[in-house]
Image (cartoon, rainbow, N blue to C red):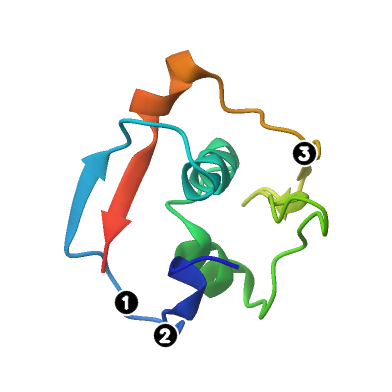
């Protein structure tokens, strides 16, 4: 899916640093979706929910559905949902 999904999910993986997104990209869009659902990123989601794959839209590769920590679901559209004004709010973690 993204560079983040290449990181092996172990229980003790923590990011080394964080910076804010400056421009929109596919990775920023997916990070926005994970952070809306209450997770840092794909790595934390996989650790907490104990899943191997995240459900994505085949056309765009964007996250389709995420389960929050309270077990309710967030469903996302095929198209971009992270508006330009929200891009600087997205945290990008470096492992």
Q: Reading the chain from its start, which is encountered first: label 3 or label 1?
A: 1
Residue sitting at x 81%, y 54%: 57
Q: CA distance from mark 3 to mark 1?
A: 27 Å
Q: Nearer the viewer, residue 58 or 52?
A: 58
What residue sits right under mark 1 in the picture?
13
Q: In which quadrant of the rendered view does residue 75 lie?
A: top right
Residue 51: x percent and y percent?
A: 67, 76
Q: CA distance from mark 1 to mark 2?
A: 6 Å
3 versus 77 height, above or below: below
* SS for dot 1: loop
Label 2: how many Cα within 10 Å (few below 14, some 14–19, many 20+): few
Residue sitting at x 66%, y 81%: 52
Q: Is residue 18 left or right of residue 83?
A: left
* SS for dot 2: loop
Q: Is residue 43 left or right of residue 89?
A: right
**Looking at the image, do the residues carrying marks 3 and 1 touch, with CB atoms under 8 Å apart?**
no
**Looking at the image, do the residues carrying marks 1 and 2 touch, with CB atoms under 8 Å apart?**
yes
Residue sitting at x 70%, y 56%: 61
Residue 18: x percent and y percent?
A: 21, 49
* SS for dot 3: loop
Q: CA distance from mark 3 to mark 2?
A: 27 Å
Q: Reading the chain from its start, which is encountered first: label 3 or label 2?
A: 2
Checking the image for residue 10, the label placed there is: 2
What residue sits right under mark 3 in the picture?
76
Label 1: how many Cα within 10 Å (few below 14, some 14–19, many 20+): few
Q: In which quadrant of the rendered view does residue 20 lie?
A: top left
Which numbered mark, 3 or 2, is in the foreground of this view?
Answer: 3
Placement of the N terminus among the 4 image quadrants? bottom right
59 versus 74 height, above or below: below
Residue 92: x percent and y percent?
A: 33, 48
Residue with the most extreme top position: 85
């Amino acid at each position: 899916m993204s560079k983040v999904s290449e990181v092996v999910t172990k229980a003790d993986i923590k990011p080394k640093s964080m910076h804010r997104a400056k421009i929109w990209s596919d990775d920023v869009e997916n990070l926005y979706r994970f952070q809306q659902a209450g997770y840092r990123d794909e790595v934390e989601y996989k650790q907490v929910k104990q899943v191997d794959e995240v459900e994505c839209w085949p056309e765009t590769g964007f996250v389709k559905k995420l389960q929050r920590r309270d077990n309710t679901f967030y469903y996302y559209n095929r198209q971009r949902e992270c508006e330009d004004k929200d891009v600087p709010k997205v945290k990008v973690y470096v492992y």
